[in-house]
Image (tube, grey):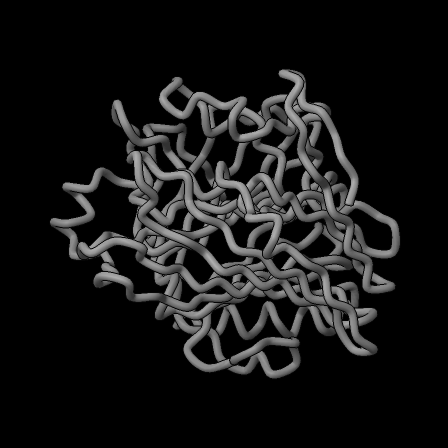
Amino acid sequence: MDEIIDKYGRKLHVVTIDNGCMSFTVLPERGMDIGDIYINGEKVSWETPEGELLHPDSVDLKEQGAWDKGFVASVSTIGPEIFGTPDEIRTVHGTGAYSTVDLSTFCVNESKDEIEVLGNVTIRGYEKNPVYKKEIRIVTKRNSTFLTRFERTINLTDDRQHIDDGFHIQPAGAFVSKGGRYVIPVKSEHMLLRDSAPAEEDPLKIYDYSMPLDPIRCYQYVPEEVRGLEMLPLPNTHHVTAEMLVDDRWTMAAVLVRPLGVFPRSLIAKRAKGKPMYAIEPCKTRPNSIKQKSIDGELMYLNPHESMDSWITLGYLMDQKEIKEVAQRIEEAKG
């Protein structure tokens, strides 16, 4: 476990996990977010702004654009509180990524077959007393190019609570720097462009990294179920969806899989302002106001002291035949 000091003098820890093929960092003070990801020594996650990792206490969540400060993770927690249109209290992403692990619960276990990282995170929240706790387990097999993040989110209160979590995942590294595309299980006409950004001829296109792309393009959609993913190392292949980013030569792809029952909606976010960002955001609801989420019937709830389990699997493929096979399964789901 390495220690670093952010630009405000606060200390953070960075833990590196290496399974022999994939290595990645875990950020205990940032909700156990996953930082950088490497395959065989090559960085495959986004190029983060150097020196910008911040301790949660260094971020004023009420400040405009606070979600973008110290935001360097490749897998960053959204929620579990209501996220979306900000107001005087809530930030865009909720407070999961600004919550610190209880270091007494944090551990790394290694066996012949796998490595697991465990830790409990009490969610910072917006109230004086905490509302949620997360029990997190990140698992990777030896010499694998995949990892799975399991979470149990617990309502700590005596009241029924909205639960609205997800992840902002940025798996687009240098392998798509010359261009590429998203492969997602939804027809383009069902992708809704948010925030009055300029329309694109091809919303699935990943542009050459020399091209600026600002303002951000965010498309929200409801993905279809993807079947036939038994070739991937998943905890479950039933009622799941999958999304993929692939380079222009189809020689490397990032694949994200998760259960639709927990994360039934998605966003893709595209921006190239300094550092190119091509993200996938699996989520429970769209990032609208709580009033709009309620009208649309998207909100999920946790009863007092109830818990909800979830998982996501993120990995990289480097075999063209396998990439095309997974892409075919995703395309078939469009109907």
Q: Residue at x 54, y 60 (%)?
A: 136
Q: Residue at x 22, y 61 (%)?
A: 304
Question: Is 145 placed above or below 274 here?
Answer: below
Q: Is residue 289 left or right of residue 314?
A: left
User: Tag count in the figure?
Assistant: 0
- Screen quadrant of the C terminus: bottom left
Question: Is 287 placed above or below 92 here?
Answer: below
Return the x and y of residue 316 as percentages of the image width and height.
71, 61
Return the x and y of residue 58 as percentages of the image width and height.
54, 22
Q: Residue at x 35, y 70 (%)?
A: 261
Residue furthest to the left in view is: 295
Figure quadrant of residue 138: bottom right
Return the x and y of residue 326 as percentages of the image width and height.
61, 72
Figure quadrant of residue 106: bottom right
Return the x and y of residue 308 as percentages of the image width and height.
36, 66
Q: Residue at x 43, y 45 (%)?
A: 78
Q: Is residue 281 left or right of residue 194?
A: right
| Foreground residue among 278 and 61 | 61
